[in-house]
Amino acid sequence: MVVDSGFVRRGLAAVIFVAAATLAVPAPAEAAGASGVAALQVALRARGLYTARVDGLLGPRTVAAVRVFQRRRDLVVDGIPGPQTRAALGRYGRHRLGERMLYFGEYGWDVAETQFLLRRQGFHPGALDGRFGGRTRASLRRFQRHDRLTPDGIVGPRTLAALDGRTTTAGAGGLTRDQSRHARSKRTLVVIRRRAHRLYLYRRGSPVRVFAVATGSPRAPTPSGHLRIVLKQRHPWWYPPKSPWAKGLHPIPPGPGNPLGTRWMGLSAPGVGIHGTPDPISVGYSVSHGCVRMAVRDAEWLYRHVRVGTRVWIF
């Protein structure tokens, strides 16, 4: 079990308290985004374990199918599609959406997510089967033309941002026209889409990298709004906050198992930051105490490409 917590930094004249994310194993009800659940359903259906409609809802049938699959593969039977479970699903469980560019002929979890997002946007890709075939490519090109993107039939950061954005007035990178205009005035911008569990790095208004993240739980949601990075810290200490659940816990020094990973990027919202996590099973879920968690290597990459003052938009 990982414990969500606070990060305390004592400076020369002030004490800064920043809450980090709970490192608790996600409960099935605290699901990944709808497209991730849809990809799970597609993978389970390919194994003959799920026969209901692919709807992106992590209901009892989906959880039961995961448990059956885990039992058959001698995995921990928890109903959670963590890294080991996805790996056991074979090619249908590989590649979170955004980890790679998607081209015609690919198979995978990310292809199924793309198909679901296209269908949700009203562009019908044919069967939701995790295969990037001709109908999926044609649907993707129609979507790209509709959103004034290059209709190349390839899923990169810009196309994915538009699929995630679901804006009524389309602008660049899944933002509204007004948001897009403001984004172009900023050299670097971080955009976090909580329900999709994805973080985008924008350059001059265009998304160039995308990462899977964990966000706040229903009881402690990640705040929305226009924020800034106000603090950067390498190899941070973890300090327990003054909360009932943290009673009796002790500070954790930098190193393996630190709840904050190796990088901390504190935001202007009190107690909220972006950080790494030694608990990769939590990435892709709504389980934190408000913070945004990333895989350790992803957090280290982002840390190198942002600065104190970088804007962070959370939707």
Image (cartoon, helix red, strand yellow):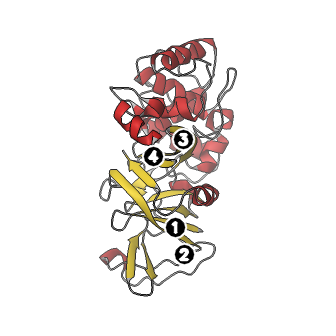
Secondary element under disc 2, as helix, strand or loop, is loop
Q: Which mark is residue 264?
A: 1
Q: Which mark is residue 236?
A: 2
Identity, as a three-letter code, of the amino acid under mark 4: Val
Question: How far is mark 3 from mark 4, CA to CA?
Answer: 37 Å
Identity, as a three-letter code, of the amino acid under mark 2: Pro
Secondary element under disc 1, as helix, strand or loop, is strand
* Mark 3 and mark 4 residues within 8 Å of each other at the beta carbon: no
Q: Which mark is residue 68?
A: 3
Question: How far is mark 3 from mark 1, CA to CA?
Answer: 38 Å
Q: How many marks?
A: 4
Residue at image x 47%, y 53%? 214
* Mark 1 and mark 2 residues within 8 Å of each other at the beta carbon: yes
Image location (x, y in percent) of residue 298: 61, 54
Question: How far is mark 2 from mark 4, CA to CA?
Answer: 24 Å
Above/below status of 75 relative to 290: above
Which of the image's four quarters has the C terminus? top left
The residue under label 4 is 191
Q: Earlier in the sequence, mark 2 or mark 4?
A: 4
Identity, as a three-letter code, of the amino acid under mark 3: Val
Residue at image x 61%, y 49%? 83
